Image: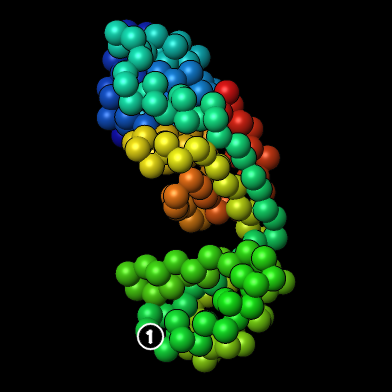
Amino acid sequence: MTRPNSDPGSIARQVRGYLDGHPVIGDAIRLGIGNYSAIARKIAADLGQPHPEAIIAACRRYPRGRGESFREAGVRRVLRKSRIETRTRVAAITLSQGVDVLQRLGDVVEELLDENSLCRVIQVSRGTVVIVDEDSVLRVTKELRGPQVLGVRKGLVELAVTSPESIEETPGLLTLLTGVLSAQGINIVEALSCYTDTIFLLDEDDLHAAMAVVTRALG
Protein backbone atom coordinates (compact mmCIF):
# COMPACT_ATOMS: atom_id res chain seq x y z
CA MET A 1 0.00 0.00 0.00
CA THR A 2 1.29 3.46 -0.89
CA ARG A 3 2.05 5.74 2.07
CA PRO A 4 -0.42 8.69 2.25
CA ASN A 5 0.97 11.93 0.85
CA SER A 6 -0.79 15.30 0.80
CA ASP A 7 1.46 16.87 -1.86
CA PRO A 8 -0.79 17.54 -4.91
CA GLY A 9 2.02 16.79 -7.35
CA SER A 10 2.75 13.46 -5.68
CA ILE A 11 -0.96 12.54 -5.58
CA ALA A 12 -1.32 13.40 -9.28
CA ARG A 13 1.63 11.14 -10.13
CA GLN A 14 0.17 8.32 -8.06
CA VAL A 15 -3.21 8.69 -9.75
CA ARG A 16 -1.67 8.75 -13.24
CA GLY A 17 0.31 5.63 -12.42
CA TYR A 18 -2.79 3.93 -11.06
CA LEU A 19 -4.90 4.78 -14.12
CA ASP A 20 -2.11 3.75 -16.50
CA GLY A 21 -2.05 0.40 -14.71
CA HIS A 22 -5.85 0.07 -14.78
CA PRO A 23 -6.71 0.77 -18.44
CA VAL A 24 -10.39 -0.08 -18.02
CA ILE A 25 -10.85 2.77 -15.55
CA GLY A 26 -8.65 5.01 -17.68
CA ASP A 27 -10.85 4.23 -20.70
CA ALA A 28 -13.97 5.14 -18.72
CA ILE A 29 -12.47 8.56 -17.96
CA ARG A 30 -11.37 9.09 -21.57
CA LEU A 31 -14.84 8.18 -22.82
CA GLY A 32 -16.43 10.57 -20.33
CA ILE A 33 -18.57 7.86 -18.70
CA GLY A 34 -16.66 7.40 -15.46
CA ASN A 35 -18.12 8.62 -12.17
CA TYR A 36 -15.25 10.66 -10.74
CA SER A 37 -16.43 10.35 -7.15
CA ALA A 38 -16.76 6.56 -7.37
CA ILE A 39 -13.42 6.21 -9.14
CA ALA A 40 -11.75 8.48 -6.57
CA ARG A 41 -13.13 6.38 -3.69
CA LYS A 42 -11.71 3.22 -5.26
CA ILE A 43 -8.32 4.81 -5.93
CA ALA A 44 -8.22 6.25 -2.41
CA ALA A 45 -8.92 2.81 -0.91
CA ASP A 46 -6.39 1.03 -3.13
CA LEU A 47 -3.63 3.60 -2.59
CA GLY A 48 -4.40 4.31 1.05
CA GLN A 49 -4.68 7.98 0.10
CA PRO A 50 -7.05 10.03 2.33
CA HIS A 51 -7.42 13.00 -0.06
CA PRO A 52 -10.38 12.26 -2.40
CA GLU A 53 -10.66 15.87 -3.60
CA ALA A 54 -7.07 15.81 -4.86
CA ILE A 55 -7.70 12.44 -6.50
CA ILE A 56 -10.79 13.75 -8.30
CA ALA A 57 -8.78 16.74 -9.54
CA ALA A 58 -6.06 14.40 -10.82
CA CYS A 59 -8.65 12.23 -12.59
CA ARG A 60 -10.06 15.28 -14.34
CA ARG A 61 -6.56 16.15 -15.56
CA TYR A 62 -5.80 12.60 -16.70
CA PRO A 63 -4.54 12.90 -20.29
CA ARG A 64 -7.04 11.91 -22.94
CA GLY A 65 -4.46 11.65 -25.71
CA ARG A 66 -4.53 13.28 -29.11
CA GLY A 67 -8.13 12.82 -30.02
CA GLU A 68 -10.26 9.74 -29.63
CA SER A 69 -8.72 6.42 -30.67
CA PHE A 70 -10.34 4.24 -33.32
CA ARG A 71 -11.28 1.68 -30.65
CA GLU A 72 -12.83 4.29 -28.37
CA ALA A 73 -14.82 5.76 -31.26
CA GLY A 74 -16.12 2.28 -32.12
CA VAL A 75 -17.20 1.63 -28.55
CA ARG A 76 -19.00 4.99 -28.46
CA ARG A 77 -20.91 4.20 -31.65
CA VAL A 78 -22.03 0.83 -30.29
CA LEU A 79 -23.02 2.28 -26.91
CA ARG A 80 -25.17 4.98 -28.50
CA LYS A 81 -27.15 2.30 -30.37
CA SER A 82 -27.52 -0.07 -27.41
CA ARG A 83 -30.42 -0.53 -25.02
CA ILE A 84 -30.75 -1.90 -21.49
CA GLU A 85 -33.07 -4.69 -20.36
CA THR A 86 -33.43 -5.99 -16.81
CA ARG A 87 -34.96 -9.04 -15.20
CA THR A 88 -35.50 -9.56 -11.46
CA ARG A 89 -35.88 -12.66 -9.27
CA VAL A 90 -33.17 -14.57 -11.10
CA ALA A 91 -31.27 -17.58 -9.76
CA ALA A 92 -27.97 -19.25 -10.67
CA ILE A 93 -27.71 -23.02 -10.20
CA THR A 94 -24.19 -24.45 -10.14
CA LEU A 95 -23.95 -28.11 -11.17
CA SER A 96 -21.17 -30.66 -11.22
CA GLN A 97 -19.39 -31.68 -14.38
CA GLY A 98 -20.55 -34.65 -16.43
CA VAL A 99 -22.48 -35.85 -19.45
CA ASP A 100 -25.18 -37.26 -17.17
CA VAL A 101 -25.92 -33.76 -15.86
CA LEU A 102 -26.48 -32.38 -19.35
CA GLN A 103 -28.65 -35.34 -20.30
CA ARG A 104 -30.83 -34.86 -17.22
CA LEU A 105 -31.22 -31.16 -18.04
CA GLY A 106 -32.45 -31.84 -21.58
CA ASP A 107 -36.21 -32.11 -21.01
CA VAL A 108 -36.57 -29.26 -18.50
CA VAL A 109 -34.43 -26.90 -20.62
CA GLU A 110 -36.62 -27.68 -23.63
CA GLU A 111 -39.78 -27.04 -21.58
CA LEU A 112 -38.54 -23.70 -20.27
CA LEU A 113 -37.50 -22.54 -23.73
CA ASP A 114 -40.88 -23.59 -25.15
CA GLU A 115 -42.54 -21.48 -22.43
CA ASN A 116 -40.29 -18.52 -23.34
CA SER A 117 -38.96 -18.60 -19.77
CA LEU A 118 -35.44 -17.55 -18.83
CA CYS A 119 -33.00 -20.42 -19.27
CA ARG A 120 -29.28 -20.03 -19.92
CA VAL A 121 -26.98 -23.05 -19.74
CA ILE A 122 -23.30 -22.17 -19.48
CA GLN A 123 -20.60 -24.82 -19.42
CA VAL A 124 -17.51 -23.89 -17.44
CA SER A 125 -14.26 -25.76 -16.82
CA ARG A 126 -15.47 -27.50 -13.66
CA GLY A 127 -19.19 -27.84 -14.25
CA THR A 128 -22.33 -26.16 -15.58
CA VAL A 129 -24.16 -23.00 -14.51
CA VAL A 130 -27.88 -22.74 -15.23
CA ILE A 131 -29.52 -19.30 -15.01
CA VAL A 132 -33.30 -19.35 -14.59
CA ASP A 133 -36.13 -17.47 -12.91
CA GLU A 134 -36.39 -18.23 -9.20
CA ASP A 135 -39.75 -19.95 -9.80
CA SER A 136 -38.03 -22.47 -12.09
CA VAL A 137 -35.29 -23.56 -9.67
CA LEU A 138 -37.16 -26.58 -8.30
CA ARG A 139 -38.08 -27.73 -11.80
CA VAL A 140 -34.38 -27.88 -12.65
CA THR A 141 -32.98 -29.34 -9.43
CA LYS A 142 -35.54 -32.15 -9.16
CA GLU A 143 -34.22 -33.60 -12.43
CA LEU A 144 -30.77 -34.06 -10.88
CA ARG A 145 -29.18 -36.23 -8.24
CA GLY A 146 -28.44 -34.46 -4.96
CA PRO A 147 -24.63 -34.39 -5.28
CA GLN A 148 -24.91 -32.95 -8.79
CA VAL A 149 -26.31 -29.67 -7.40
CA LEU A 150 -23.34 -27.77 -5.99
CA GLY A 151 -25.21 -24.59 -5.11
CA VAL A 152 -28.21 -22.37 -5.74
CA ARG A 153 -27.96 -18.59 -5.50
CA LYS A 154 -31.17 -16.56 -5.50
CA GLY A 155 -31.88 -12.85 -5.07
CA LEU A 156 -30.13 -11.93 -8.31
CA VAL A 157 -30.99 -9.62 -11.19
CA GLU A 158 -29.98 -9.78 -14.82
CA LEU A 159 -28.87 -6.61 -16.58
CA ALA A 160 -28.50 -7.07 -20.34
CA VAL A 161 -27.10 -4.52 -22.78
CA THR A 162 -28.37 -5.32 -26.28
CA SER A 163 -26.25 -3.84 -29.05
CA PRO A 164 -26.23 -3.87 -32.86
CA GLU A 165 -24.47 -6.74 -34.62
CA SER A 166 -21.39 -4.57 -35.08
CA ILE A 167 -20.53 -5.37 -31.44
CA GLU A 168 -18.94 -8.61 -32.66
CA GLU A 169 -16.31 -6.56 -34.49
CA THR A 170 -15.91 -3.94 -31.73
CA PRO A 171 -13.34 -4.87 -29.08
CA GLY A 172 -13.52 -3.49 -25.57
CA LEU A 173 -17.23 -3.14 -24.78
CA LEU A 174 -17.44 -5.94 -22.19
CA THR A 175 -14.20 -4.80 -20.59
CA LEU A 176 -15.40 -1.21 -20.43
CA LEU A 177 -18.80 -2.02 -18.87
CA THR A 178 -17.19 -4.40 -16.40
CA GLY A 179 -14.78 -1.65 -15.43
CA VAL A 180 -17.39 1.04 -14.82
CA LEU A 181 -19.49 -1.37 -12.73
CA SER A 182 -16.47 -2.42 -10.67
CA ALA A 183 -15.41 1.20 -10.18
CA GLN A 184 -18.83 1.82 -8.65
CA GLY A 185 -18.21 -1.00 -6.16
CA ILE A 186 -20.75 -3.31 -7.81
CA ASN A 187 -20.02 -7.03 -7.52
CA ILE A 188 -20.51 -8.94 -10.77
CA VAL A 189 -21.73 -12.46 -10.01
CA GLU A 190 -21.59 -13.62 -13.64
CA ALA A 191 -20.78 -11.87 -16.92
CA LEU A 192 -21.04 -13.09 -20.47
CA SER A 193 -21.09 -11.70 -23.97
CA CYS A 194 -23.01 -13.63 -26.64
CA TYR A 195 -23.90 -12.37 -30.11
CA THR A 196 -25.51 -8.93 -29.53
CA ASP A 197 -26.02 -9.24 -25.75
CA THR A 198 -23.67 -8.30 -22.94
CA ILE A 199 -25.19 -9.80 -19.80
CA PHE A 200 -24.39 -9.21 -16.14
CA LEU A 201 -25.78 -11.14 -13.20
CA LEU A 202 -25.78 -8.94 -10.11
CA ASP A 203 -27.02 -8.90 -6.54
CA GLU A 204 -30.53 -7.47 -6.32
CA ASP A 205 -29.39 -4.62 -4.07
CA ASP A 206 -27.04 -3.35 -6.78
CA LEU A 207 -29.65 -3.00 -9.53
CA HIS A 208 -30.36 0.73 -9.20
CA ALA A 209 -26.69 1.71 -8.99
CA ALA A 210 -25.86 -0.55 -11.94
CA MET A 211 -28.69 0.91 -14.02
CA ALA A 212 -27.45 4.42 -13.30
CA VAL A 213 -23.84 3.75 -14.28
CA VAL A 214 -24.69 1.72 -17.41
CA THR A 215 -27.28 4.29 -18.52
CA ARG A 216 -24.61 6.98 -18.18
CA ALA A 217 -22.26 4.81 -20.24
CA LEU A 218 -24.83 4.54 -23.02
CA GLY A 219 -24.98 8.34 -23.11
In the image, what residue occupies the spot 51% across and 30% down? 79
Image: 61 above or below 78: above
Q: Residue at x 46, y 25 (%)?
A: 77
Find residue 29 and report its horizontal and vertical position in percent. 43, 20
In the image as oriented, which residue stretches furthest toward the bottom? 145
In the rendered image, the quadrant that contains the C terminus is top right
**Could you say which is closer to the camera, residue 219 or residue 148?**
219
Type of the residue with mark 1: Val
Placement of 90 over or under 22, stated as above or below: below
Q: x and y percent of residue 189 in the render?
A: 51, 55
- In this rendered view, identify the residue nearer to me: 2 or 218: 218
Color theme of the render: rainbow
Q: Nearer the viewer, residue 135 or 79?
A: 79
What is the quadrant of residue 54 in the picture? top left
User: Is 212 above or below relative to 90?
Assistant: above
Asked which secondary structure carries label 1, the reply is: helix
Q: In the rendered view, does 83 fall on the left or right side of 22?
A: right
Q: Which residue corresponds to the image point at 33% horizontal and 26% vertical from the top-left? A: 71
Residue 7 in view here: no
Q: Position of residue 30 (x, y in %)?
A: 40, 18
In this rendering, would 64 be left or right of 33? left
Q: Residues within 10 Å of mark 1 (few under 14, many from 20)?
A: few
Residue under label 1: 99
Q: Can you give x and y, in whole percent of width and height, for residue 4 in the image?
A: 36, 23
Q: Could you tell me how many numbered marks the image carries?
A: 1
Residue 61 visible in the picture: yes
**Relative to residue 6, is residue 167 depicted above or below?**
below
> Residue at horizontal 63%, vertical 58%?
156
Q: Quadrant of the N terminus?
A: top left
